[in-house]
Image (cartoon, helix red, strand yellow):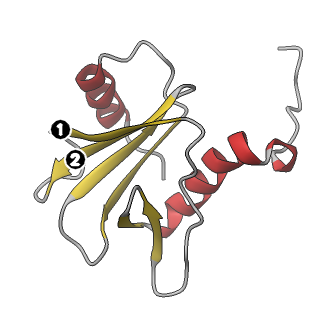
């Protein structure tokens, strides 16, 4: 399920983004607790903390990383999780494809499907 438009709008306003948001997904610290929003643009990955009570309202910038930073791999089995910037995060299964697509866009472009209408 995509992140709802109001959350995207909050993120864009919070960061003052002019750039297009390529990927956006929620995560929590491994084992529950604090919430985060991962925002991927053409230039960077920004991780926003939402605190422990909300998963949709950014409060602070936890960190910013160059776009060439790998997000995955995502471990699946007992829930989807990944390590990033020295911390462990959990995501809902529906966002595993988002993390994989964000990484593939930078690290494995040949694995992405071709644009069926490249002239549009």
Determine the residue located farthest toward the bottom in the rendered image: 78
> Gap in Å between the C-alphas at discs 1 and 2?
5 Å
Which residue sits at x=81%, y=45%? Answer: 112
Q: Does 4 sit above or below residue 101?
A: above
Q: Is residue 71 visible?
A: yes
Residue 68: mark: none
Determine the residue located farthest toward the left in the rendered image: 53
Look at the numbered disc 1 and give the secondary structure of its residue: strand
Q: Residues within 10 Å of mark 2 (few under 14, many from 20)?
A: many
Look at the numbered disc 2 and give the secondary structure of its residue: strand
Q: Does 103 sit above or below residue 60?
A: below
Q: Residues within 10 Å of mark 1 (few under 14, many from 20)?
A: some
The answer to whether 37 appears left or right of 73 in the picture is: left
The answer to whether 119 appears left or right of 71 in the picture is: right
Where is residue 44? Give x, y as percent: 49, 31
Where is residue 91? Give x, y as percent: 41, 65
Can you identify the residue that label 2 sits on? 49
Can you identify the residue that label 1 sits on? 60
Q: Is residue 58 visible?
A: no
Q: Does 97 sit above or below residue 80?
A: above
> Is 44 in front, or is 10?
44
Where is residue 103? Give x, y as percent: 64, 49
Q: How many marks?
A: 2
> Which image quadrant: the C terminus?
top right
> Is 15 in front, or is 120?
15
Circles 1 and 2 in contact, beta carbons < 8 Å: yes
Which residue sits at x=47%, y=46%? Answer: 2
Which residue sits at x=88%, y=25%? Answer: 117
Where is residue 56? Give x, y as percent: 24, 45
Q: Earlier in the sequence, mark 1 or mark 2?
A: 2
Which residue sits at x=26%, y=20%? Answer: 13
């Amino acid at each position: 399920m995509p992140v709802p438009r109001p959350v995207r709008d909050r993120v864009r306003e919070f960061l003052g983004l002019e750039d297009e948001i390529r990927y956006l997904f929620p995560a929590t610290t491994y084992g529950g607790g604090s919430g985060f929003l991962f925002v991927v643009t053409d230039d960077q990955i920004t991780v926003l903390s939402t605190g422990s009570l909300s998963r949709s309202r950014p409060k602070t910038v936890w960190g910013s990383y160059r776009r060439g930073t790998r997000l995955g791999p995502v471990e699946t089995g007992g829930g989807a999780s990944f390590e990033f910037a020295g911390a462990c995060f959990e995501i809902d299964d529906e966002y595993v494809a988002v993390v994989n697509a964000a990484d593939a866009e930078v690290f494995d472009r040949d694995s992405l499907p071709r644009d069926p209408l490249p002239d549009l």
